[in-house]
Amino acid sequence: MSSTPSARVPAEPVGLRLVNEQLGTEPLVVHAHGHHRNHPHWPPIRDAFFRSAPATIGPSARVTVITCNNGAQAMGLLERGLEHLGVPYRVGGQGVRDWVNARDKPRTIRALLDTIDTPYVLYADSRDALILGNPEILVDRFEDHFATGIVFGADRLSWPPLPRFKRFERAMAAGQPGDCHYLNGGTWIGRTAFCRDLFAAALEIPAAPEAPDSEQGILRTLWMERPSDIALDYRCRMFQNIGFVAAPIFRIDTGHTTDDT
């Protein structure tokens, strides 16, 4: 897939600079998925971000930030972080009771996509993700490094842990550095028109019977059907999933968000 590169807007030096010293990259979105005991890096990153100076980045003509939040007590961290940066966002799923990711997440995202008129859309989970700086940076990195319709964050674990998915993911990750080789649906950026089509297709695919509550099986099925249109951010240029990462591979700096990684 291809598109004409959009006009670049210099990134404001705000937020938090997180360096993955293992890969030499500076991910801008951090996702602390999994059980709390399995992401020891999360509290230092989260707390340093909220100690950074508030900003007023404002809206973007290139990318819209979206999330799903039905109002459950644990939700809303992403939105608080975006308000800290002065970045507007759109929320779907408010008031949905008995939320099931496999059913409600794809249809909520699909409905949100119909409200967006920017060429790109950025998604992150409400409960356990933070965007550390100007989302414009992610558009630049997408255009510099990817030619697909959507890029998902990469994870250390394959979930649901089914052989048919893991075999495919390992084959796609052949030769990639690090150990984040598996799709995680909690963070992604994509071309809006493509994402409308992708999540419309997601509504027609049943969840994996071995994990009926998870949308991950749906997303992996779509990836297997469209391998040239979907990519993972193996080098963590944009997204960093920190669940199950224990090694001391991160450096945290405040007030220095760059767009040259």
Image (tube, grey):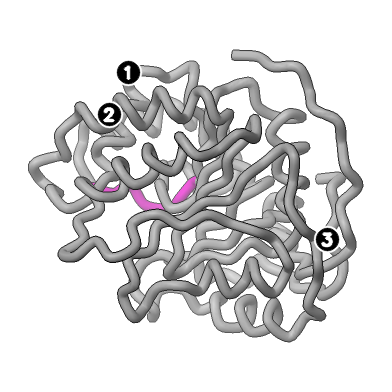
Q: Residue at x 69, y 77 (%)?
A: 49
Asked if the residue under mark 1 is in contact with the one under mark 2, i.e. CB atoms within 8 Å, the reply is: yes
Question: Magenta region, mostly helix, strand or loop?
Answer: loop
Question: In screen coordinates, is 71 left or right of 50?
Answer: left
What residue would you read off at disc 2? Answer: 221
Residue carrying label 3: 257
Give the residue type at disc 3: Thr
Residue at image point 37% right, 37% down: 110
Q: Amino acid at mark 2?
A: Thr
Q: Amino acid at mark 1?
A: Glu
Which is nearer the eye, 69 or 29? 69
Q: Quadrant of residue 80?
A: bottom right
**Magenta includes 133?**
no
Among numbered discs 2 and 3, the one appearing first in the sequence: 2
Label drawn at residue 171? none
Structural distance between the alpha carbons of marks 2 and 3: 35 Å
Q: Where is the N terminus found, in terms of image quarters? A: top right
**Residue 126 place in picture, x, y as percent:** 45, 64
Residue in the foreground of this view, choosing between 237 and 215: 215
Categorize mark 2 by other alpha carbons within 10 Å: few (<14), some (14-19), many (20+).
Answer: some
- In-front residue for pair 23/126: 126
Compared across the picture, whether 162 is left or right of 157 comes to left
Q: Earlier in the sequence, mark 3 or mark 1?
A: 1
Task: Tell me if residue 14 comes above or below residue 23 in the rendering.
Answer: below
The local crowd at label 3, few if under 14, some if 14 to 19, many if 20 or more residues have their Cα within 10 Å, is many
Instruction: Write the start and end of the magenta stretch as one range.
Output: 154-160
SS class, disc 2:
helix
Asked if residue 10 is positioned above or below residue 30 in the image, the reply reads above
| Residue underneath mark 1 | 225
Q: Are marks 2 and 3 in contact (CB under 8 Å)?
A: no
